Image (cartoon, grey):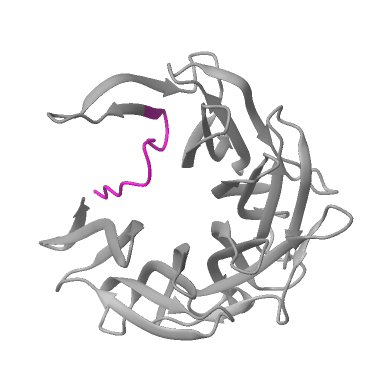
């Protein structure tokens, strides 16, 4: 059994809770399950943010049950009372052979426009290794219309998935996630800065376009924030001792060179979930492995 807290939402029938914090104990003012009774498919949420319009924006994927199974990018807006409003849409596509594209949307940032800039991956072949998952970047307006949609690094054998997107120090947006060269070997972290050009398209801002940040024998970042004069990465990795996983932080300089790496964890595996920077202090959240005979499980 594996219990890893990702956000305020469960994976299948999503549960959203608004909690009022007071001097006593937290109070749940309402909760809601999504999708509603008549919706088909299995949605999962990976991120939730409050929008400038004082509602909640949820991003994730919507799995469609077919022979092979595939998922579309999902965007949903929920008001302060838990009601679905305005946008409850999915964004997909198919290749020339009629095979649906597979997606996962991991993270989202709200731009000054405002718009919802979503990153994750798209696999344009699904049942073939000819084109493995590539880096997805899709910009969606409040009314659900797509302003920009593009796929990067899907024309080679590299596997690359955007896991987190944040404002970049030098302008534009910084993305981190997982990178696997030629579809084999260990997963590693990548970092890339993207900016919008004069044609309204997002392009890589630096050369090389992505920077690989190794950590341990395998592992990758799922979190990035500006920190000091550079960035801080967070994730889960194998430090090199058996199959044990540890939480890690990595400090990058502004030019994306590695400053330092720190591992955190006890004798059993630990997994990174999220972090908050408060001044010069970093607060980590995750799950801790608990060994039991012949297996293990995780708890918050």
Residue 113's spot in the image, x, y percent? Answer: 71, 41
Membership of 11 in magenta stretch: yes
Pick the front one: 64 or 137: 137
Above or below for 283 versus 112: below
Kindly give the residue lying farthest to the front in the view shown: 279
The answer to whether residue 193 of the structure is visible from this angle is yes
Outermost residue, right side? 199
Q: Is residue 131 left or right of residue 77?
A: right
Q: Quadrant of residue 7?
A: top left
Of residues 234 and 186, which is closer to you in this image? 234
In the image, is residue 4 above or below residue 249?
above
Query: Residue 277 or 161: which is nearer the viewer?
Result: 277
Magenta residues: mostly which secondary structure? loop
Viewer-proximal residue among 296 and 289: 289
Is 192 drawn above or below residue 137 in the view shown?
Answer: below
Q: Check if residue 106 falls in the magenta segment.
A: no
Is 292 on the left or on the right of 26, as rendered? left
Q: Position of residue 203 (x, y in %)?
A: 77, 64
User: Residue 212's x, y, as percent?
Assistant: 56, 80
Labels in figure, total: 0
Residue 217 is drawn in which quadrant?
bottom left
- Please provide percent x and percent y for residue 237: 36, 73
- In the image, the segment drawn in magenta is 1-16
Seen at 21% across and 50% down, the residue is: 300
Residue 66 visible in image? no
Is 110 placed above or below 86 here? below
Query: Relative to residue 17, is residue 93 drawn left or right?
Result: right
The residue shown at (66%, 44%) is 112
Tell me if 184 is positioned left or right of 300 in this view.
Answer: right
């Amino acid at each position: 059994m594996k219990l890893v807290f990702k956000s305020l939402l469960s994976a299948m029938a999503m549960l959203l809770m608004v909690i009022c914090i007071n001097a006593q104990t937290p109070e749940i003012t309402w909760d809601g399950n999504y999708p509603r009774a008549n919706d088909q498919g299995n949605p999962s949420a990976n991120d939730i943010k409050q929008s400038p319009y004082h509602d909640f924006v949820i991003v994730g994927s919507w799995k469609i049950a077919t022979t092979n199974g595939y998922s579309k990018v999902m965007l949903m807006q929920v008001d302060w009372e838990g009601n679905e409003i305005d946008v409850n849409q999915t964004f997909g596509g198919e290749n020339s052979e009629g095979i649906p594209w597979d997606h996962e949307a991991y993270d989202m940032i709200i731009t000054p426009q405002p718009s919802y800039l979503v990153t994750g991956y798209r696999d344009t072949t699904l049942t073939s290794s000819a084109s493995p998952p590539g880096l997805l970047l899709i910009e969606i307006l409040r009314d659900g219309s797509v302003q920009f949609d593009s796929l990067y690094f899907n024309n080679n054998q590299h596997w690359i998935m955007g896991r987190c997107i944040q404002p970049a120090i030098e302008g534009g947006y910084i993305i981190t996630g997982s990178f696997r060269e030629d579809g084999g070997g260990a997963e590693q972290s990548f970092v890339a800065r993207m900016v919008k050009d004069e044609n309204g398209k997002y392009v890589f801002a630096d050369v090389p376009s992505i920077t690989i940040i190794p950590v341990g024998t395998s592992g990758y970042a799922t979190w990035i924030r500006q920190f000091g004069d550079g960035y801080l990465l967070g994730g889960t990795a194998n430090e090199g001792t058996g199959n044990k996983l540890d939480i890690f932080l990595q400090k990058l300089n502004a030019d994306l060179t590695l400053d330092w790496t720190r591992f955190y964890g006890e004798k059993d595996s630990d997994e990174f979930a999220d972090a908050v920077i408060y001044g010069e202090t970093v607060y980590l959240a995750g799950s801790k492995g608990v060994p039991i005979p012949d297996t293990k499980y995780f708890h918050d």
